[in-house]
Amino acid sequence: MRPGAVKTCLVWAGRWAWLCPYAMLGLAAAILLLLGFSVWTSLLVAILLVCPAVLIWGAIQVRRRKSKERERGS
């Protein structure tokens, strides 16, 4: 593995991370449409929707922390 490969991979993942919530929402909707509504499909949809919610919450927390650090530094 070349020296900067891991950093390059992380940068690439960061650029495309915004797509994850939309993909999970689409996948959850497709599962409900294809498999219908049952206990198991609703459980799977709930799991698929928790992941993007956690990602969005984490992104908000990181932005808030960065803005607070900037305010303290000025």
Image: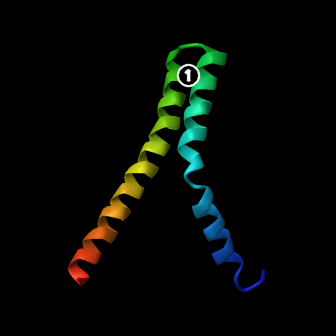
Quarter holding residue 6: bottom right
Residue at 48% from the left image edge and 36% from the top image edge: 49
Residue closer to the observer: 42 or 22: 22
Residue at 57% from the left image edge and 63% from the top image edge: 14
As drawn, 54 above or below 10? above
Residue at 25% from the left image edge and 70% from the top image edge: 68
| Label 1 crowd (10 A; few <14 / some 14-19 / many >=20) | some
As drawn, 32 above or below 20? above
| x and y percentages locating residue 27 in the rendered image | 62, 32
| x and y percentages locating residue 53 in the rendered image | 43, 43
Quarter holding residue 70: bottom left
Residue at 59% from the left image edge and 48% from the top image edge: 19
Residue closer to the observer: 13 or 31: 13
Q: Which quarter shows the C terminus?
A: bottom left
Q: Which residue is mark 1?
A: 41
Q: Specify the amino acid type for callout 1.
A: Thr
| x and y percentages locating residue 37 in the rendered image | 54, 13
In this rendering, would 63 be left or right of 38? left
